Amino acid sequence: MTISAPGRTRLPAFLRTPQGAIGLVLLAFVVAVALIGPLVAPFPLDRPLGPPGLGPVAGAPFGLDELGRDVFSRFLHGGHPVLSLAVVSIAATYLLGIQLGMIAGLNHGSRTDAGIMRVVDVFIAFPALLLLLVLISGSGTSPTVMAVGLVLVLFPGVVRIVRAATQDVATSGFVDAAVVRGERQLSIMYREIFPNIVQTVLADVGIRFSSAIVLAASLNFLGLGARPPAANWGLMVAENRTILPTNLWAAVLPAAMLAVLTVAVNLLADAYTRTLGRTSGVESR
């Protein structure tokens, strides 16, 4: 008999794959920059230090932006708004999408199912950026409005995935047994259905998270997100595109970090999906 070392925990299988490990390292790096960056930034994010568009010099390793502010300091301040908006909007998206998807799936073919899916179809019919532009033009550009807009864009896909997964599980014998026992629908949803669809939901998170990052960055690039003098990686790309000939770093640095964040999430999601498929295959033998 083999005795394992006490207190020793193993990483989940998908994090022990090359893709998962690389994705985890990249994501940890981005999160560390976003959380620690504002604490170690050498200058205030809105203080002019010299000529606009100045290239890298001593004391400013990535030069100055279009208003003469330190690019590196603004970069260190710009990650937290991006991550917080994405995390909040994704959490709200799945909170709403899972509820509606399970209700629709358990009531397949009923008026409740039809009503939920018609609402979902209406939101899917609108192009994502158009829906966000309409909402922001009427309600302003606060983080709350942007988060609500991202939820409205992303939740229809979650509802469809959860509904389909719920329909597959709802035909199982243990769900029929719960119905015969007279359990309430809410109890069936969270005691019988959700534990059996949670892996499907987790496999979908990477796609939605990446979409939230891209959409939020697009709004900031168009000048419809964060407002100056706020620091935001997407806004920095838009602000500094006019000084690219004199200081390329002012736009490339935040754009590169957005790319790293997107790649990290996609690597983790892909590793989880691949590992899930292999695990399911082993269990089915």
Image: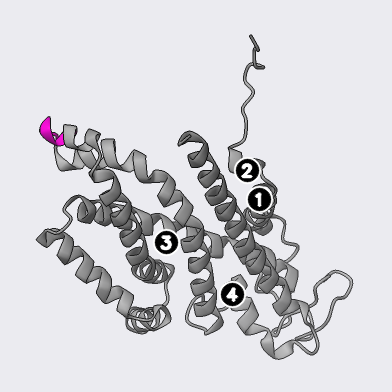
- Answer above or below: position of 151 versus 94: below
Amino acid type of the residue tagged 4 in the rendering = Gly
Q: Secondary structure at mark 3?
A: helix
The answer to the question of whether label 4 and label 1 lie on touching residues, with beta carbons closer than 8 A, is no
Whichever of labels 3 and 2 marks the residue nearer the N terminus, that label is 2
Mark nearest the camera among 3 and 2 is 2
Measuring 77% from the left and 85% from the top, which residue is drawn there? 53
- Answer above or below: position of 219 versus 261: below
Q: Which residue matches tag 3?
A: 89
Question: Disc number at residue 15?
Answer: 2
- Tell me where residue 275 appears, x and y as whole percent: 56, 45
Q: Which residue matches tag 4?
A: 234
| Residues in magenta, as a range | 178-183
Q: Secondary structure at mark 4?
A: helix
- Tell me where residue 267 appears, x and y as whole percent: 62, 56
Crowding near the residue tagged with mark 1, few <14, some 14–19, many ≥20 C-alpha atoms within 10 Å:
some
Furthest toward the right, the residue is 58
Q: Closer to the camera, 54 or 131?
A: 131
Tell me the distance, in whole angstroms, between the alpha carbons under discs 3 and 2. Answer: 25 Å
